[in-house]
Image (cartoon, helix red, strand yellow):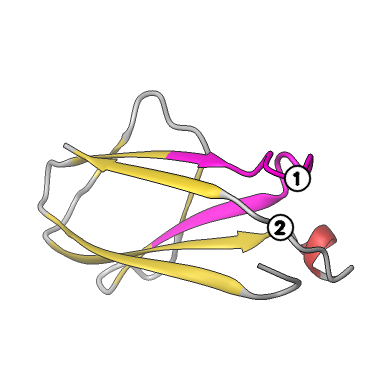
Amino acid sequence: MKGYQYIDFEFYASAGQILYVDLNDDIEGNKNTLDVLLFHRAFNHSVHLPSQMDTGFSMSLNGTYILRILQMRTFARRGHTNAFVLTLTLN
């Protein structure tokens, strides 16, 4: 991922399920340069999630969610390139 690019991951979840996110962006020595946002059509805004979630995030609605990975603005505007490994768990 380079600059202002972002990657969306789409998934279905039921209300009450718990989402766990583990984002490892320390692949090339560039730790903590990425943001994680969660969208649902019924939200009027996105929800910012931490890149490592020990407690999880409770899904409040049934439906399709989009998890977006993007670089923090300070790195994106420099044209920074970043690799990452993402693990999503839905219980």
CB under 8 Å between discs 1 and 2? yes
Q: Is 55 left, or right, of 29 in this rendering?
A: left
Q: Reading the chain from its start, which is encountered first: label 1 or label 2?
A: 1
- Camera-nearest residue between 89 and 18: 89
Secondary structure, mark 2, is: loop
State the extent of the magenta-drawn residues as a range: 22-38
- Place of residue 61 in the rendered image (x, y in percent of width and height, measured from the top left): 16, 57
* Residue 9 sits inside the magenta stretch: no
Quarter of the figure that contains the C terminus? top left
Q: Is 76 on the left-hand or right-hand side of 59?
A: right
Secondary structure of the residue carrying tag 1 is loop
- Report the disc number at residue 14: none
Residue at left 79%, top 39%? Answer: 29
The circle on residue 28 is 1
If the image is split into quadrants, where does the N terminus sit?
bottom right
The residue singled out by tag 2 in the image is 82
